[in-house]
Amino acid sequence: LHFILDRALKTQATSSAIDIFSKPYLSKREKLALTIGVIDKGHHYIKAFGKLSNTAPAVPNANTIYEIGSVTKVFTVTVLAKLVNDGNVELDAPIRLYLPVEVINHLNPAVQSITLQQLATPTWTAPFARQFPCRNPIS
């Protein structure tokens, strides 16, 4: 019982910390969807705020897909550099080597051959990007 109570208090504290962190940020932005995830000692906490559209009442959740912004790119490339240094991935390897089969089976072959280095290069543009007017590279 002590562990369960301790865990509940920890969850509440983490949830409160996310609320405290997010309120000033949200108060300055009228049109915003925000999802915050925290991993702490193997436990996952996810909270979502705002709305996805001004015309629809949909709210974000743990499965909401966001476009990658500039800060996210720096974070992602930093994580990628660590994975390369640790020998977990290779920059010149095609992304299909790191994707689940159920994803690979639905990808255009041109997408499957993209390398991690290409994805990590800020100025790189997929040569086939114009083929996807809906911005969805899944065939």
Image (cartoon, grey):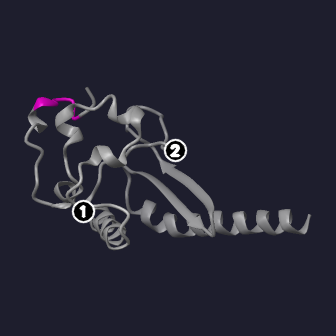
SS category of the residue bearing label 2: loop
Marks 2 and 1, how far apart in space? 22 Å
The numbered mark, 2 or 1, whose residue comes first in the sequence reads 2
Query: Mark 1 — residue?
Result: 70
Q: Position of residue 23 (x, y in %)?
A: 51, 64
Which residues make up the magenta segment? 131-135
Residue occupying image coordinates x 71% and y 64%: 12
Taking depth in this image into account, of 54 and 124 the one nearest to the observer is 124
Taking depth in this image into account, of 13 and 98 the one nearest to the observer is 98
Q: Position of residue 102 (x, y in %)?
A: 41, 32
Q: Amino acid at mark 2?
A: Asn
Q: Residues within 10 Å of mark 2 (few under 14, many from 20)?
A: some
Taking depth in this image into account, of 72 and 139 the one nearest to the observer is 139
Q: Position of residue 88 (x, y in %)?
A: 38, 63
Left or right: 45 with respect to 51?
Answer: right
Q: Quadrant of residue 103?
A: top left
Q: Amino acid at mark 1?
A: Ser
Query: Mark 2 — residue?
Result: 61
Is-magenta flag for residue 134?
yes
Residue occupying image coordinates x 57% and y 55%: 46
Instruction: Name above or below for residue 47 compared with residue 136.
Output: below
Q: Main secondary structure of the magenta part?
A: loop
Left or right: 12 with respect to 92?
Answer: right
Residue occupying image coordinates x 35% and y 49%: 98
Is-magenta flag for residue 15?
no
Instruction: Name above or below for residue 58 compared with residue 121.
Output: above
SS category of the residue bearing label 1: helix
